[in-house]
Amino acid sequence: MITTKYLHMSFMFVVILWIASCKDDTLSCPNLTINATTANNSGDVYGLQMVNVVNNCLHLIVSYSGGCANHNFEMRWNGALMESMPPQAQLILYHNGNQDPCDAVLSEHLFYDLNELDPTHSYETIIVHLQNYANPLSFHH
């Protein structure tokens, strides 16, 4: 029953976000971390419950165990686009659970700005590959 409640709440949040996004083509989202030396590690364990692109943002619902410490998430990119048409980018979500000893299952909505993949808008579409997520995503300017 709790799972159904959270599912309904998540659905309502996405619907509200979608309706609000109709007023503007750009959402305010945290930036990607661009660093080739840190873009190969996903950190502490997490699950991806939902992944989609909303306007210029990558929207994720993640779950993880914890409850006693602050958890930090960071979307990492090595700064390179793969040479293909359309170009492709490999992203990694990094999770730092700060050694949280608790076992409650928590979920969180995360948003990341995809405009940084192509700041000059040179490409109409970029294919986004997210580590630990099987389906590629299309980001359209």
Image: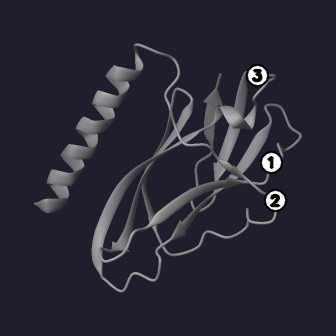
Residue 30 drawn above or below residue 25: below
Q: Quadrant of the C terminus?
A: top right
Q: Badge 3, how many Cα within 10 Å: few under 14, some, many 20+? A: few
Quarter assignment of residue 136: top right
- The spot of residue 11 in percent (x, y) is 27, 40
Residue 16 lies, with reference to residue 107, above or below; the image says above
Circle 3: residue type: His
Tell me the residue that label 1 is attached to.
Answer: 79
- Amino acid of disc 1: Gly
Distance in Å between CA atoms under marks 2 and 3: 22 Å
Residue to which mark 3 is pinned: 121
Name the residue beneath numbered marker 2: 36
Give the CA distance from mark 3 to mark 1: 15 Å
- What kind of element bears circle 3? loop
- Image coordinates for residue 130, horizontal then vertical, percent: 62, 53
Q: Secondary structure at mark 2?
A: loop
Which residue does the image show at 49% across and 40% down from the upper left?
Answer: 52
First-in-chain label (2 vs 3): 2
Q: Is residue 80 left or right of residue 65?
A: right
At label 2, the amino acid type is Ala
Q: Is residue 117 left or right of residue 140?
A: right
